[in-house]
Amino acid sequence: MSVLAVGLSHRSASVSLLERTVQSDDGIVKLLADVLAAEHVGEALVLSTCNRLEVYADVAKFHGGVQDVTERIALRTGVSLEELAEHLYVHYEDRAVQHLFSVASGLDSMVVGEQQILGQLRTALQTAREEEGVGRVLGPLADAALRAGKRAHAETGIDNAGRSLVSVGLDLAAASVSDWSSVSAVLVGAGSMSSLAGTRLRRLGAGRITIVNRSADRAERLAATLDAEVAGIDELAERLAGADLLVSCTGAVGLVIGADVVAAALAQRPEKPLAVLDLALPRDVDPDARALPGVTVVDLESLRSVLDGADVARDVEHVRRIVTDEVGAFLARQRSERVAPTVVALRARAQEVVDAELARLRTRTDLDERASHEVEVTVGRVVDKLLHTPTVRVKELAEEPGGDSYADALRELFALDPAATEVVTRAAVVVETGDDA
């Protein structure tokens, strides 16, 4: 296994650069296809969220794989290689595994411990499977990372370790609010973040909430759970005219709320300030809106420094231990599985020798059926006992770093045909995938 991870996230790049790399569902599929078509790539998975774009690949060569993946990220995002090079990070083999497990566990998120990444990774894996992008390497890796993430949330308090993105954002955007019952809020978008924002606003006691979304059905479903009103996107300026707070988080690629829309709303309510919380990436709200009088804009860039300072040391350390344990167990299983074809080939070779010698014995002696069977069983037991210790030990040793060398030694000492282990590996692929081709 030669796993390569190439990407950029909120830790390595600015929000403005991340905005330029955000991919639609169709864009993710196209990037995945581009990477899979590369010379050095065998499998691939693309993880694209509001705070990161990462490509995981099973590669034949490190340098060739890095070049292949980087060039295709640049091509698909439109960001030059020179600019990307300053912000991309590259992880290989064990470090790539460690990184994916950390991402899945919420350790690498803007809000430490957020669970949304698990669903995003699950979606990325499903897309890769539908596009036949993952197999024996990345499929088990992503499954194991998801298990590690679930453990992190089930066994620790990481979910509550840092204040949620929504809570922090609302605290900053509406810092001057003293009486929430008089607040009128407009939520643009009807996804999970808008649902969280609406729930938080209801708990704070917000007086009026309006859901604005392009899909009326989704808006109505969310409004029903929040006891909120529904309005069409064409009514946004009108609704903003009477609002104290705007919260926007859509999945759109590009601006949703122009500065002119905000200005038009302000013109109808002189002297009344407007707080804006933009949780989308790319931004939903035109950055020029922050220059308008009476407008306070809080976006992901504004939240970064606040969230980085959260005191979550105890739970983070617990999750790190879980990740370390899960990574170690996964790598040990992978190393053990890599030596399995050699063990099978060795036993097959031993059986060939036994069969050949028994055939010779039958031609030279006149044993009855019972005696012949006893000889066959006895010889088989001798071979099994002789091979038991070395085959068990090579599996145990293979779980340690550098354990592949023991399998190499077995192949050399017993003069095993390399093609024999390859046949066993191919047979395992057929069994796992059901592919008869």
Image (tube, helix red, strand yellow):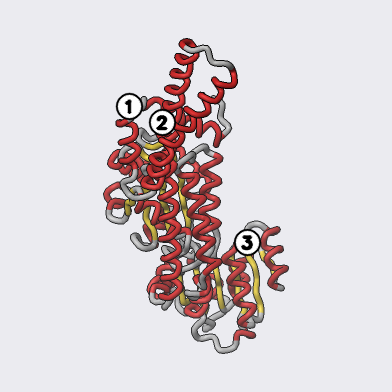
Q: Quadrant of residue 11?
A: bottom left
* Rendering coords of residue 3 (x, y %): 38, 45
Circle 1: residue type: Ala
Left or right for 122, reference 396:
right
* Rendering coords of residue 80 (x, y %): 31, 47
* Rendering coords of residue 259 (x, y %): 48, 66
Task: Name the foreground residue: 334 vs 259.
Answer: 334
Q: Earlier in the sequence, mark 3 or mark 1?
A: 3
Give the Cα separation between the discs numbered 3 and 2. 64 Å
Residue at the (46%, 11%) spot, across then down: 364
Q: Earlier in the sequence, mark 3 or mark 2?
A: 3
Q: Which secondary structure, mark 3?
A: loop
Q: Is residue 37 visible?
A: no
Label 1 crowd bin: few (<14), some (14–19), many (20+), radius 10 Å: few
Left or right for 422, reference 284:
left
Task: Name the foreground residue: 417 vs 21.
Answer: 417
Residue bearing the label numbered 1: 415
Query: Which numbered tag is attached to residue 143?
Result: none
- Tell whether label 1 touches label 2 (CB within 8 Å): no
Q: Earlier in the sequence, mark 2 or mark 1?
A: 2
Residue bearing the label numbered 3: 213
Residue at the (34%, 60%) spot, across then down: 12
Task: Name the foreground residue: 408 vs 283.
Answer: 408
* Rendering coords of residue 205 (x, y %): 64, 82
Label 2 crowd bin: few (<14), some (14–19), many (20+), radius 10 Å: many
Q: Which secondary structure, mark 2?
A: helix
In the picture, the quarter occupied by the N terminus is top left
Residue at the (67%, 59%) spot, across then down: 218
Q: Is residue 259 visible?
A: yes
Task: Name the foreground residue: 52 vs 348.
Answer: 348
Circle 2: residue type: Leu
